[in-house]
Amino acid sequence: MGGRILAAGLMLALLLTPLGCSSGAGSGGGPSGTGASEPTELERAQIREYEGVDLSSFTDFRENSIAGPQQVDRESYRLTVGGLVDTPIELTYDEVLAGREQYKKVVTLNCVEGWSVEILWEGVLVSDLLDAAGARPEGNTVVFRSVDGYSTSLPLSFIRDRNILLAYKMNGIELPPERGFPFQVVSEEKWGYKWAKWVEGIELSDDPGYRGYWESRGYSNTGDLGQSSRD
């Protein structure tokens, strides 16, 4: 599971399209203002075409998380950004989004199980969050930790070069609980096990050999598409 780059001309138009700033709305893990909406309502609300690209549905995903979908409370949720930073920070859901430029881009998630989905993702840059905490020069690896105990990592250079997003929307709707509310890492060009869902911690490390949940069980630590997912 990972992302792939679209045709050059189209990708230039899609990559990092500023959205302005928003603090989000609604309650719980459902779409804004709807509470615990039925999947059919979400299906009607989502965008299925963007800039000439046909998009997959959020219902096209298969459930393969390590502990099942997580129900995260918006009001008590906190995102921590720490590790090798000058000032560790702890942010509410609204604080993650408020005052930060937000972006959208179409990226394909490819699963090692053999399926893929092409989705319009919206979110903030992981690098902006790290810079807000004062990323130290010795940091080279970013570890993502999830509510369910899952973890994975990406090189800091990759995160900066590819403008990796921490997404809060897919196809124009707030991430449903089963898709990773409140935040999912959009690890384009990587297999899907690098796409951490339900992210609650971002840690800057100087250990490029850090191995997350699946990596410690034999999966490739790079997670690059075009290469075997197994070491």
Image: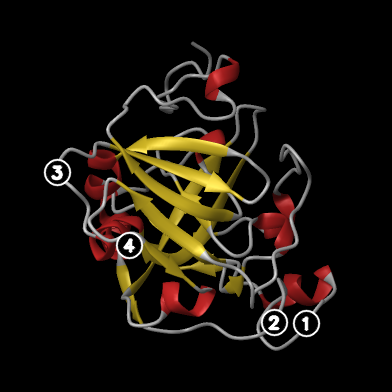
Residue 140's quadrant in the figure?
top left
Residue mark closest to the camera, 1 vs 4: 4
Q: Percent x, y for residue 61?
A: 70, 48
Could you tell me if residue 187 is visible in this image?
A: yes
Q: Is residue 83 above or below residue 121?
A: above
Name the secondary structure under disc 2.
loop
- Amino acid under label 1? Gly
Q: Which residue is mark 1?
A: 35
Q: Which residue is mark 4?
A: 129
- Amino acid under label 3? Pro
Mark 3 or mark 1, which is nearer the start of the sequence?
A: 1
Residue mark closest to the camera, 3 vs 4: 3
Q: Of 26 and 48, which appears nearest the observer?
A: 26
Q: Which residue is mark 2?
A: 27
Name the secondary structure under disc 1.
loop
Mark 4 or mark 1, which is nearer the start of the sequence?
A: 1
Q: Which residue is mark 3?
A: 137
Left or right: where 145 falls relative to 67: left
